[in-house]
Image: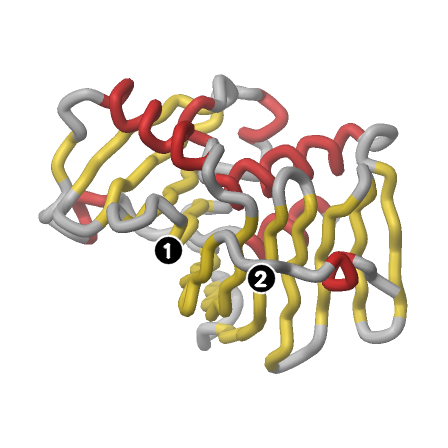
Amino acid sequence: MRYLVLSLLVLAVTTVYGQDKSYRPVADPAVVEKKIMDNSLKVSSITSDFVQEKKMEYLDEVLVSKGKFWYKHESKLRWQYDEPYEYIIAIRNGSFYIKDGVKVKVYDVAGNPAFREMNDLILKIARGTLAGDKRFEIEMYENDRFYLLRLRPIDAALKGFLQTTEIYLSKFDLSAEKVVMHETETDYTQITFINRKLNNEIPESIFDIK
């Protein structure tokens, strides 16, 4: 279950220098980290469409999914997959919801260490606050458009299912345009966020999963 949920939420790519020579190390990571953290305090909500591309070693083709994403300060979140199948992951009031078709499963975050770990990781990705997470060794790069945070887990539990996570933050509004994770050397998932809107009104009913 832990692998399934994280697979839906993250992506993996080759190393930054192997992919794009335009990135260079950030001169003062502490300044950028403070900028990211300060900006996160100004964000009360995020809505976005997304496109997910997933590649697994045993499949010849890339699996493409599309859907919508909502986040509301400080701990409400909904990932909704619309194509090619319907699937929802939501976090609200200390509970983790998974809806597959008409079936809904609810997990208590506080009472389940695995879901507590996922809950924290997912919300920090949504807020863009992983820069200060001590469970990761963090490198920062930049080009003209993005800050790129590359995170390698230090925490033993995270090492079991994460190799490298990469988060691309737009320099325009410091929101995540892509989030990256190596699950294995060959398996990856890529999620690109499009039509992002910050600080718009989101009805509470969005997070009510039935």
In the rendering, which numbered label is found on residue 69?
A: 2
Label 2 residue SS: strand
Between 208 and 62, the residue placed more toward the observer is 208
Between 201 and 102, the residue placed more toward the observer is 201
The answer to whether residue 154 is left or right of residue 69 is: left
Between 13 and 186, the residue placed more toward the observer is 13
On screen, 203 above or below 143? below
Q: Residue furthest front?
A: 201
> Which residue occupies 57% across, 72% down?
67
Q: Quadrant of the C terminus?
A: bottom right
> Which residue occupies 33% across, 48% down?
173
The residue that disc 1 covers is: 177
Q: Residues within 10 Å of mark 1 (few under 14, many from 20)?
A: some
Q: Check disc 2 and give the amino acid type.
A: Phe
Residue 77 picture location, percent across and down: 66, 51
On screen, 187 above or below 80? above
Residue 22 picture location, percent across and down: 10, 48
